Image (cartoon, rainbow, N blue to C red):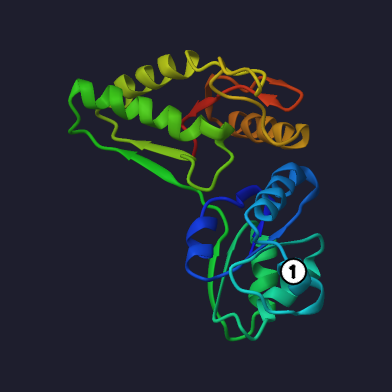
Amino acid sequence: LRQAGAVDLELEARLLGGGAEVAREIRRQSADIRRLEAAGHAAGLDAPGLADLAVGGHHQRGRIGVCRARAGLELAAQDPHADVVTFTGSVKVGKYISDKAGYKRLVLELGGNDPLIICDDLSDADLDKAADLAVKGATANSGQRCTAVKRIFVHEKIAPEFTEALLAKTRAWSYGDPLDPKVDMGTVIDERSAQLFERRVADAVAQGARLLHGNQRDGALYAPTVIDRVD
């Protein structure tokens, strides 16, 4: 079970293991789920498919199905043929599935607040590499993935050097039209999300954090941003 934003992460393993995939289409990211439907159809994985399970409880193995209402996830979670239910998506929907799945085994991937820890025993080359990995880890896919770097803890001994390296690489990270292959980072999922990021950074600065770079927004396009001294 998963929401549309993460439909491809473990799909191959699930189907090869004889399992099934039910994806819930969400309004803000329906294009991906429609591509998944088309790919499943081309591969012969859709007939009759788990779309039937979502609305009628029929059991199919090794299939891809799509449901467009939360009730479909409930039926899939309660299906008597499912020994284990895994879900990748929001905390809200994850709690809903947990409530409906009863005593089934659950594996819920509901995002994270992942820290990157930079120790003080790095060579200059390793420190530069760490800064490079930090920027890529935070900004790849516009930061919209559960494994993205959310926070960075740096030993005070090397904090100034690391910060300068991080800033230099962040300033060089291009952003713009997501369809332009020359840019490193495109938009976030919608303008409302970009506005939320902008407000959160402004709130952190108001409470004493230092804005070192970014917090610029143009619609759904949000600049790579670095803030320091966040308590």
State the image coordinates of residue 116 (x, y, percent, origin top left): 38, 41
For this view, does 83 lie left or right of residue 133? right
Q: How many marks?
A: 1
**10 Å crowding of disc 1: few (<14), some (14-19), many (20+):** some
Q: Identify the residue shown where x is 58% and y is 86%.
A: 103
Quarter of the picture containing the N terminus is bottom right
Query: Depth check: 118 or 8 in front?
Result: 8
What residue is disc 1 on? 48
The residue nearer to you, when weighing 37 against 1, is: 37
| Residue 70 placement, left or right of 112 | right
For the residue pair 168 and 46, the one nearer the viewer reads as 46
- The image shows residue 79, relative to residue 142, as above or below, that is below
Q: In this rendering, is residue 142 above or below 35? A: above
On the image, the x and y values in percent for residue 95 come to 66, 69
Q: Label 1's element?
A: loop
Q: Amino acid at mark 1?
A: Pro
Quarter-wise, where is residue 24 in the image? bottom right
Whole-percent x and y of residue 42? 67, 51
Residue at figure coordinates x 49%, y 14% from the top left: 171
Q: Is residue 156 left or right of residue 179?
A: left
As rendered, which of 30 and 146 lies closer to the eye?
Answer: 30
Residue at figure coordinates x 52%, y 71% from the top left? 18
Residue 228 placement (x, y as % from top left)? 47, 28
Quadrant for residue 83, please give it: bottom right
